[in-house]
Amino acid sequence: MELTQRQMDMVKAAIDIIANKGYEKLTTKNLAAEIGVTEAALYRHFKSKRELVTMVLSYFEFLSCEVLTEIRESNCAPVDCIRKFVLNRYELFSRNSALAKVMFSEELFKNDPGFTGQYQSIMHIHRGEVVAFIQKAQKEGSIDGGLDPTQLFRIIVGSMRLIVSQWNMCEGGFDLQAEGEALLETIIYMIEVRK
């Protein structure tokens, strides 16, 4: 992902504004004040609010694809690949709670169907990778082959969405990484073939 430092500052400031004040408060005035530039300076980097939010989603996609590439290149066991991906999401959101609020916010996606399409594209990438890990684990006999891989993906990622939403609602009132890992291990215990 090729962004200048100033553009990255704007993306991160936009994430903070959306997370803490709401999508409607993401204005050139508020963004300029947040990063200490003039409103005119913003337009040299992003033509519109829509382009900026598109870049926020692209930033999340970049982070996701980066970790998925690392996981694929690690040649670890498929169940461990699933673990690494999910635990990375918990670690990422723990470090950046504003990003978690934005990515799990319905407000953002109600405002522009284009954002929904872009987010669905990201989810398809996640689904494709995780389902492939599940299928590989089923072929090697470590995950029950009678379970539908797409439904398992929904269980794994749906439970992640739930726990991150709970964590967001209580303003980080529990250890997301510890609770997320415990939840994931429960799911893996339920779907793994024990020998």
Image (cartoon, grey):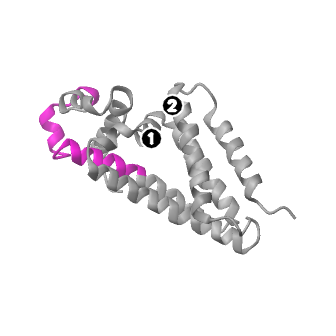
Look at 54% across and 65% down and name the residue there.
Answer: 129
Task: Quickly name the residue at label 2.
Answer: 168
Whether residues under marks 2 and 1 lie with C-beta atoms below 8 angstroms apart, the answer is yes
Question: In the image, is 92 to the left or to the right of 45?
Answer: right
Look at 76% across and 60% down and name the residue there.
Answer: 192
Look at the image and tell me whether residue 73 can be seen. no
N-terminal label among 2 and 1: 1
Q: In which quarter of the image is the N terminus?
A: bottom left
The residue segment tinted magenta is 33-60
The image quadrant of residue 188 is bottom right
How far apart in space, not on screen, are marks 2 and 1 (Cα)?
9 Å
| Type of amino acid at the residue the image marks with label 1 | Phe
Q: Where is residue 86 in the image (x, y as percent from the top left)?
A: 60, 51
Residue 123: in magenta span = no
Q: Where is residue 184 in the image (x, y as percent from the top left)?
A: 68, 48
The image quadrant of residue 118 is bottom left
Task: Quickly name the residue at label 1.
Answer: 104
Question: In the image, is 66 to the left or to the right of 174?
Answer: left
User: Which residue ends up furthest to the left in the rendered image?
Assistant: 40
Under tag 2, what secondary structure? helix
Under tag 1, what secondary structure? loop
Look at 43% across and 39% down and name the residue there.
Answer: 99
Between 125 and 68, the residue placed more toward the observer is: 125
| Type of amino acid at the residue the image marks with label 2 | Asn
Tell me, for residue 135, which label it has, or none: none
Vertical relation: 105 (above or below) 190? above
